[in-house]
Amino acid sequence: MYGLSELGKYSLLLYQALRSSTEVSTYRENFFSELVKTGYDSLGIIMLTGVFTGAVLTVQTAYQLELAFIPVSTIGAIVSESILIELAAVISSLVLSGKVGARIATELGNMRVSEQIDALESMGFNSVSFLVVPRVLAGLCMFPVLYVVASVFGVGGGVAAGVLSGAVPAADFMKGARMYFFPWDVLFGFIKSFVFGFLITSISCYKGYFASGGAEGVGRSTTQATVLSCIFVLLADLFLAVILL
Amino acid sequence: MIEIQNLTKSFGDLLIWKDVSFRIEDGETVAIIGRSGCGKSVLIKHINALLTPDTGNVLIDGTNIHDQHYIQIRRLRQRFGILFQGSALFDSINTFENVAFPLRYFTKNSEQQIRKKVLEALELVGLEEASEKETSELSGGMRKRVGLARAIILKPQYLMYDEPTSGLDPETADEINQLIETMADTLNITSVVVTHDMHSVLEVADKVAFLDHQKLSWFGSVEDIGRSGHEDLLRFVSASEYQIPQQV
């Protein structure tokens, strides 16, 4: 029952956000600053995540194929496919649910408990348009971009680890990667990151916007936003894999 | 004029108050008093539709705000200014920008006009020199005054104060009371003050609404408190160690 009521409130907030999305002048400025906070400010952690994911995957794949009599270029094919189709989108989204999701929930939660959202409403502002719409839109725009960054750095990290560990030369790695490259895999990654971006930003906005109970309540909302975002990212990942692959 | 008609509000099973009715005439200052948790702040949040009542109406110059579409409610809200209990300043921007905020979004004023109006408002509350300060650098009293400057920047018809003097030292509280009087007199604003500070009430209010036992227990002029014969009200007033005005 509680879950249904939460789902209802979440849906209503999204409906309000959708209706408010026409009030561009209200959120234009916030949208650009959110693009920076969500995208540019996350570049470092996404590059790092990408590089290490690719590197670890290469070392582990090489270890598993050590005794198999198959060409070393297969390592490149396995690593790049895994990154493009799954890891770049999922791992970066899980990291971003902690970075971007927690930031959004904390910001809005603090604004709620310190009556800043009431102050906006009392001035005649549409607070959903001002606060929720730009954050969700920025997520929709920037998560696919961050997916590309994670993919590039993931493959780069894989090549570097292959060369440095002596498991696979760069040329062989890239040969394998090219051999099994399908444009659909990238499109699939884009779709996933778009959906994950929506889920993480909207869930975090919802949890922050309806936070209550002072500092403790904001902490609780932030934790719930992060945990729920991770759960829904994993559920959506499975759902999209089943229906799109 | 604000007319509150048979307002009832509950949160879940918890009844806050029922059948609250009173009228605030133009230019008047009405204080809403009562013990902590009696629903004073909840009541003013119904006046500009930040909260929705279970039943009842709030008429703003004859228009029931709770019957309006959201866009009309937002237009009606622009006729109000609110000073929130914790000031509700936006902590991501500085003092000047906090006060300029409504002007930037609701007017087509040039940067020069905005600057002039903001400095005028800050001067009115005695904080002109603090315009470039971050809100985190402001004291409690300064935050209240910046909140007040922001509330009056669009020259509202109605001004609502939620616990304007709570948490302030007596001297600063007195300054805020004087500001409330100045706003009412110089800007001819209709004011609603939520407080349990009787000193503040008797200093600024024309009329008093006393919330007690989940209802509007008494409504009348400040001068009538002493002769009201209302035991709970008199006990509430005398508990604040303030001398009840005697009938002239």
Image: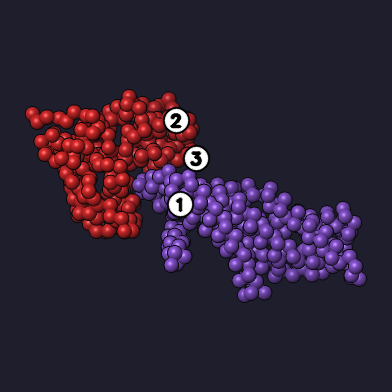
In percent of width and height, residue B105 lies at 41, 45
Type of the residue with mark 1 = Ala
Residue B92 badge: 3
Q: Label 2: which residue?
A: B138
Image colour assigned to chain B = red
Instruction: Please give the name of the residue rendered at 40% of the width and 36% of the height, measured from the top-left corner.
Output: B99
The image quadrant of residue A162 is: bottom right
Residue A211 badge: 1
Which chain shows up in purple? A
Labels 1 and 3 share a subunit: no
Type of the residue with mark 2 = Leu
Q: Is B41 placed left or right of A25 in the picture? A: left
Q: CA distance from mark 2 to mark 1?
A: 26 Å
In percent of width and height, residue A153 lies at 75, 55
Instruction: Tell which subunit mark 2 falls on.
Output: B
Residue A116 in sight here: no
Instruction: Please give the name of the residue rendered at 69% of the width and 48% of the height, measured from the top-left corner.
Output: A44
Q: Look at the numbered disc 1 and give the secondary structure of its residue.
A: loop
Q: Is residue B234 above or below residue A205?
A: above
Q: Is A238 placed left or right of B177 in the picture? A: right
Q: CA distance from mark 2 to mark 3?
A: 14 Å
Which tag, 2 or 3, sits closer to the chain's start? 3
Labels 2 and 3 share a subunit: yes
